Image (cartoon, rainbow, N blue to C red):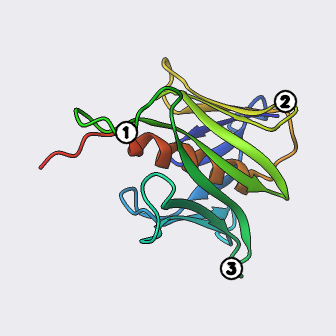
């Protein structure tokens, strides 16, 4: 299935023009907790980032996707990029992926670069999220059946992952 995301709204690609919005992010842009609602405004899920004090970075960070009733739909843990040394004193090591469980299956969301993300299962590529250079927004292509809310939740996970490597400016 092909989708596109513009201004925090998910649309089916190739549908009627203009395509109806399938779901949208209804939280403030800068908030770390995001809510996704369907086209009628009913809450589908919320995403958040939590940090456990007992563990060290990046294992301490957890990405959560929960239903309105609090059921965990997906839970992800950060991993360092291949070849990164957490003992490096000159700079922080880069993180480039999140291992997660969604729908009882294991997946890995990998950031190839800041404009290209791939969600893969053990068997195959499940989703690609690619920035649309010419029109803006993001193009999403799935090979597995994900509900629209889950597609948007995984997109939000990709945005969280991108922020992990931003420089802190004081």
The N terminus is located in which quarter? Answer: top right
Q: Which residue corresponds to mark 2?
A: 124
Distance (Cα) linking label 2 and label 1: 26 Å
Tell me which corner region of the image, top left, top right, bottom left or bottom right, holds residue 72.
bottom right
Tell me which corner region of the image, top left, top right, bottom left or bottom right, holds residue 29.
bottom left
Specify which label sits upstream in the sequence, 3 or 2. Answer: 3
Secondary structure at badge 3 equals: loop
Secondary structure at badge 1 equals: loop
**Figure check: 111 above or below 10:** above
Q: Are marks 1 and 3 in contact (CB under 8 Å)?
A: no
Instruction: Say which residue appears at 79% left-offset and 49% top-offset.
Output: 106
The answer to whether residue 155 is left or right of residue 135 is right
Distance (Cα) linking label 3 and label 2: 29 Å
Q: In the image shown, does 51 or 14 lie closer to the viewer?
A: 51
Q: Which residue corresponds to mark 3?
A: 70
Q: Which mark is residue 7?
A: none
Distance (Cα) linking label 1 and label 3: 29 Å
Q: Which residue corresponds to mark 1?
A: 165
Instruction: Say which residue appears at 83% left-offset and 36% top-offset.
Output: 122
**Figure check: 78 above or below 113:** below
């Amino acid at each position: 299935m092909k989708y596109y995301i513009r201004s925090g709204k998910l649309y089916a690609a190739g549908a009627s023009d203009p395509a109806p919005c399938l779901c949208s992010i209804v939280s403030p842009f800068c908030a770390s907790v995001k809510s996704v609602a369907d086209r009628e405004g009913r809450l589908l899920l919320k995403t958040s980032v939590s940090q456990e004090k007992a563990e060290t970075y990046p294992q301490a960070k957890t990405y959560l996707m929960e239903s309105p009733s609090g059921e965990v739909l997906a839970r992800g843990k950060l991993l360092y990029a291949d070849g990164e040394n957490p003992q490096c004193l000159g700079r922080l090591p880069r993180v480039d992926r999140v291992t997660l469980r969604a729908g009882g299956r294991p997946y890995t969301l990998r950031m190839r670069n800041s404009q290209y993300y791939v969600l893969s299962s053990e068997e195959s590529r499940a989703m690609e999220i690619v920035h649309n250079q010419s029109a803006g927004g993001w193009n999403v292509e799935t090979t597995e059946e994900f509900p629209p809310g889950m597609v948007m939740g995984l997109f939000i996970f990709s945005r969280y992952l991108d922020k992990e490597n931003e420089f802190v400016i004081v």
